């Protein structure tokens, strides 16, 4: 932040305190105050008090961003093409555009980074300090904030802001982008309408949340949907929707609400479909129990392939306790999960669906048996010759998967 912007912003803050107004509720007021103080600053410059401003409008925008936005980071928030912003240190501010990382010219002081994080956490009620050096929170625009502070990090605060592309909301849009074939899109649409349990897998930043949003755009209008997440990320266009997120413990170590607790509570809310943002630990057991009760659901999981996703989902529930063993978990995964959609991202930042598996419902040599119905070969996602027995679930709902699988 330049010295003139810092000085003018401080003048506006002093005026706000004196007049007792709230700039957060009226951004036009912040703009007016900034414009008046910029003009006053230039008038003083004419008297020789300091150097004048070469760009009044630019300075005015910077002051407003400092007062009501996120200061030097605000232009990145205003740019719809930027997917992610992260800070490794004062001179290491990065952005990702179309999946490709870029080092910016922005330089921030350590104190400035702390003030930006505090401003971002203001609306969430969450905190980050020595007793709680990690924080996950949602920003008002739906972006996800993750912060880690020293001494967990070496010397500087690590800040990551994941933004979500609201322009991609449906499967046809993914088809237009080349991430999905029309036949695979129609097959997934049938699966959602038939109440199939879907596992979306992939690495970091491959578009798993976007895929979940796109899949849910095909849900029936009358469905009551309950979502469970660590922090709010899903942005669903659903009429009957309940969204829940975890809560951190208080300073006294009480009041924590975990993902496991939320999944259990969701079952008391009469859901027609349950969505879990991501499974990482023992909450996978509670999800399987919910799906095993006949409740349709979807979730995401980090994995290197569709088969690895099934193996991981068979392993995570074992973290729930010694009384849980593979003899229960593996057959439950085989009977509950219907489809696995695996995503990837290449070095050019292009995201695509690589594979769609359908489980057979059987366990072979201790592993869940599944067959690929769509595989990407030579850059094209095409149907295979597989016809797993599980496709009967689609036929029972009145759909004919042969229409797209034979294409």
Image (cartoon, rainbow, N blue to C red):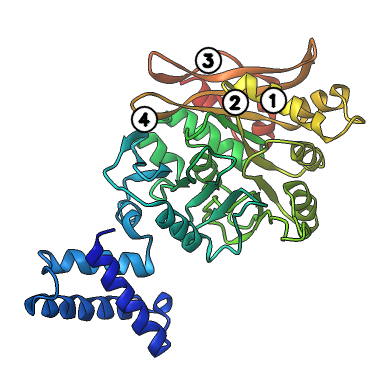
Q: CA distance from mark 3 to mark 4?
A: 27 Å
Instruction: Indicate the secondary structure of the residue bearing disc 4.
Output: loop
Marks 3 and 2, how far apart at CA = 22 Å
Q: Would you say 273 lies left or right of 84 here?
A: right
- Marks 1/2 in contact by CB < 8 Å: the verdict is yes
Q: How many marks?
A: 4
* Tag 1 secondary structure: helix
Q: Residue tagged by mark 2?
A: 303
In front: mark 3 or mark 2? 2
Lower sequence index among marks 3 and 4? 4
**Which of marks 2 and 3 precedes in the sequence?**
2
Marks 3/4 in contact by CB < 8 Å: the verdict is: no
Q: Which of disc 2 and disc 4 is earlier in sequence?
A: 2
Q: Position of residue 87 (x, y in %)?
A: 42, 44
Front one among 297 and 392: 297
| SS class, disc 2 | loop
* Camera sees residue 359: yes
């Amino acid at each position: 932040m330049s010295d003139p912007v810092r000085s003018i912003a401080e003048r506006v803050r002093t005026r706000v305190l004196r007049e007792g107004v709230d700039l957060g509720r009226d951004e036009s007021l912040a703009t007016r105050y900034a414009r008046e103080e910029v003009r006053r600053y230039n008038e003083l410059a004419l008297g020789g008090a300091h150097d004048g401003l070469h760009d009044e409008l630019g300075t005015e925008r910077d002051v407003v961003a400092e007062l009501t936005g996120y200061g030097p980071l605000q232009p990145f928030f205003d740019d719809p093409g930027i997917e992610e912003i992260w800070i490794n240190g004062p001179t290491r501010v990065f952005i990702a555009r179309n999946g490709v990382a870029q080092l910016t010219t922005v330089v921030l002081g350590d104190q400035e980074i702390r003030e930006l994080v505090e401003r971002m956490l203001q609306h969430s009620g969450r905190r980050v300090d020595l007793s709680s050096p990690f924080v996950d929170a949602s920003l008002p625009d739906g972006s996800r904030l993750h912060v880690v502070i020293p001494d967990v990090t070496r010397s500087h605060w690590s800040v990551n802001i994941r933004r979500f592309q609201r322009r991609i909301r449906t499967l046809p849009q993914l088809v237009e982008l080349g991430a999905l074939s029309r036949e695979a899109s129609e097959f997934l649409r049938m699966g959602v309408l038939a109440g199939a349990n879907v596992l979306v897998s992939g690495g970091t930043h491959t578009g798993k949340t976007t895929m979940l949003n796109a899949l849910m755009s095909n849900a029936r209008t009358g469905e009551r949907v309950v979502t469970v997440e660590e922090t709010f990320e899903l942005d669903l266009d659903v009429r009957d929707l309940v969204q829940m997120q975890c809560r951190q413990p208080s300073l006294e170590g009480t009041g924590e609400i975990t993902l496991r607790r939320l999944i259990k509570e969701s079952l008391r809310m009469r859901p027609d479909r349950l969505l879990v943002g991501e499974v990482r630990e023992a909450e996978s057991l509670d999800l399987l129990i919910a799906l095993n009760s006949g409740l349709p659901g979807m979730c995401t999981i980090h994995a290197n392939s569709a088969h690895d996703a099934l193996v991981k989902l068979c392993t995570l529930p074992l973290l729930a306790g010694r009384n849980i063993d593979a003899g229960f978990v593996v057959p439950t995964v085989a009977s509950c999960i219907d489809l696995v959609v695996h995503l990837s991202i290449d070095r050019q930042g292009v995201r695509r669906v690589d594979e769609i598996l359908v489980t057979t419902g059987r366990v072979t040599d201790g592993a869940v048996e599944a067959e690929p119905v769509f595989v990407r070969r030579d850059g094209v996602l095409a149907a295979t010759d597989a016809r797993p027995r599980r496709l009967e679930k689609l036929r029972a709902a009145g759909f004919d998967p042969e229409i797209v699988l034979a294409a």
